[in-house]
Image: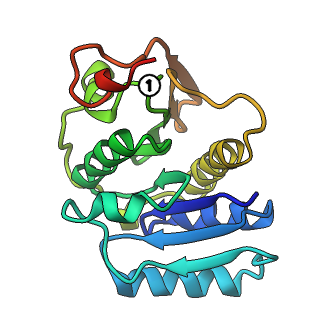
Amino acid sequence: MNARILILGTTEIAFVCAEQLMRVGAGHLELAGSSVYDLHLLAERLEAAGAKHCTQVGVAERTFDAHDSEDLIRNFDVVVDAMVDWQLKLVASDACMRLTKPLVHVGGEGFRYQLYTMRPGRSACLRCVFPRIGIDDFPKAQDEDASFPPVASVLGSLQAIEAAKLASRFGASQGNELFKFDFLSGEMEMVTGLDAVSDCPDCGNRRR
């Protein structure tokens, strides 16, 4: 895979996703988030994991925020959202939709999460998706330290699978389905029909 993949976030999910992408031979990974210090710590963990292979791993010298999100994202082929901050998730969605870059989103807390691959021209943006699945624009802040490591491992691996398929153009990537997981009860639900919304200024303008 020669594609450039950007991973947003310094969470355990981001670490697992990056490690798995390195193991399958991703060509170039770059890490970005709200703290450059945390990004360097994450990069050190990845190097210590011994999974570098031929993958080039970089750390963004600037943090990801609403001011320069498009400048950062435009140089990548696939973007992975492993962030905690829900406002930044929407910023990433907006930028990816405008630049027609696929976004692999994970969000939630505790044992309940959702996975959604947003593909501009086919998918609804996160601003349209969240109300449809009963999520407010800005849910309460998640406690990063309250995560359950096996859950993070599953979610990060699922994101890596989606990002790898998009980067290599191999297999069928999702586009208008969202998967909801309750790891405590063992239930999984698939929400379908999340197509671009015609009157949305973001996803509606890119409908095919």
Count all numbered tags in the image, as a single digit: 1
Specify how the rendered protein is coloured: rainbow
Tag 1's secondary structure? loop
Q: Amino acid at mark 1?
A: Ser
Q: Residue at x 19, y 48 (%)?
A: 140
Q: How crowded is the residue under tag 1: few (<14 C-alpha within 10 Å), some, or many (20+)? A: many
Q: Residue at x 50, y 62 (%)?
A: 7
Residue 62 in percent (x, y) is at 33, 79
The answer, for residue 154, to whether it is visible in the render is yes
Residue 201 position (above or below residue 73) = above
Q: Which residue is mark 1?
A: 123
Q: Residue at x 52, y 65 (%)?
A: 12
Residue 150 in percent (x, y) is at 61, 55
Residue 58 location, quadrant: bottom right
Q: Nearer the viewer, residue 69 or 52?
A: 69
The answer, for residue 143, to whether it is visible in the render is no
Residue 130 in percent (x, y) is at 29, 29
Residue 47 location, quadrant: bottom right
Residue 83 position (above or below residue 170) = below
Residue 148 in percent (x, y) is at 51, 57
Q: Residue at x 70, y 61 (%)?
A: 21
Left or right, 105 with reference to 196: right
Left or right, 32 with reference to 153: left
Q: Nearer the viewer, residue 150 or 98?
A: 98
Left or right, 125 with reference to 179: left
The N terminus is located in which quarter? Answer: bottom right
Q: Nearer the viewer, residue 43 or 57?
A: 57
